[in-house]
Amino acid sequence: MHRDPLPQPFTRVSKPRLYEQLVTQILGYIESAHLGPGDLLPAERELAERLGVSRATLAQALVALEVLGVIDVQHGTGAVLVHRPSVASVIKGLSEHRNRLPDIVEARSTLEVKLAELAAERRTDAELAAIENALDVMKAEIDSGGKGARGDELFHQAVTAAAHSTVLAQLMTFIAEMILETRLESLGQPGRPAQSLASHRVITAAIRAQDPEAAKAAMLAHIVLVSDVALLK
């Protein structure tokens, strides 16, 4: 007697994360309000009240949308719509990003730790000044209420330049867009901008002292810090 093969077992359906639910609601609002590229979303306080969540919880959803390039959160202006994607494409994009996050962290801990070591060995006075200037830019951003993303980017670019390694610099350029995703996520965590700036200062002190081992250790500690992203856990 012929028997049909046993059916494949169902896979467990995971419960959507709260920020994913909020992302879906925000995208629904964008659609119903007929917002287009360049339009502003409501202020965070108003949006949080409409959704019935805290501003901290809303901030996670906004970071998720910023990571995927749906919005651009500008200090002093608010969240500006960049493009209107479908809900399905956004949820898929978030899932894909979660899956590749460990690989991004692995690449950063490999490349940037070596770059810090080389920068301590090879930096010029002018390159040290560029690193220190990036700290000033980041501090000014944070003091004015921003996340310090531009100063953070300048800092890592300056360390890369000070390492005088053409191939490593090319590899950093190759993963720059993925690093931007982790930068936005990390600096979106409460208290993280100030913590990141403090760890930048430790790295800078080691590079200033031309201490390669201390620079390596400081950069590794920094990568561990910024890779602790509660949003995607």
Image: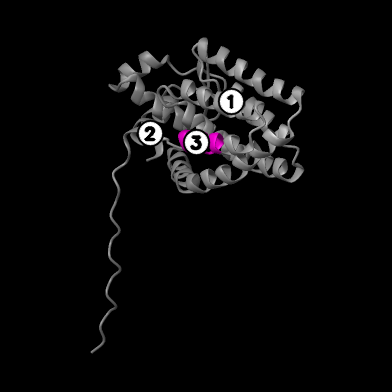
Inspect this view and state whether residue 34 appears.
no
Question: Furthest-bottom residue in view?
Answer: 1
Tag 2 or tag 1, which sits nearer the N-term? Answer: 2
161 is within the stretch colored magenta? no
Relative to 54, is 176 above or below?
below
* Residue sitting nearer the eye, 62 or 7: 62
Tag 3 or tag 1, which sits nearer the N-term? Answer: 1
Amino acid type, callout 2: Thr
Q: Give the range drawn in magenta.
A: 217-225
At a point 48% along the width and 26% down the height, the residue shown is 187
- Residue 112 is drawn in which quadrant? top right
Tag 3 or tag 2, which sits nearer the N-term? Answer: 2
Percent x, y of residue 157: 67, 30
- Residue 116 is drawn in which quadrant? top right
- Residue 21 is drawn in which quadrant? top left
Residue indicated by mark 1: 152
Residue indicated by mark 2: 24
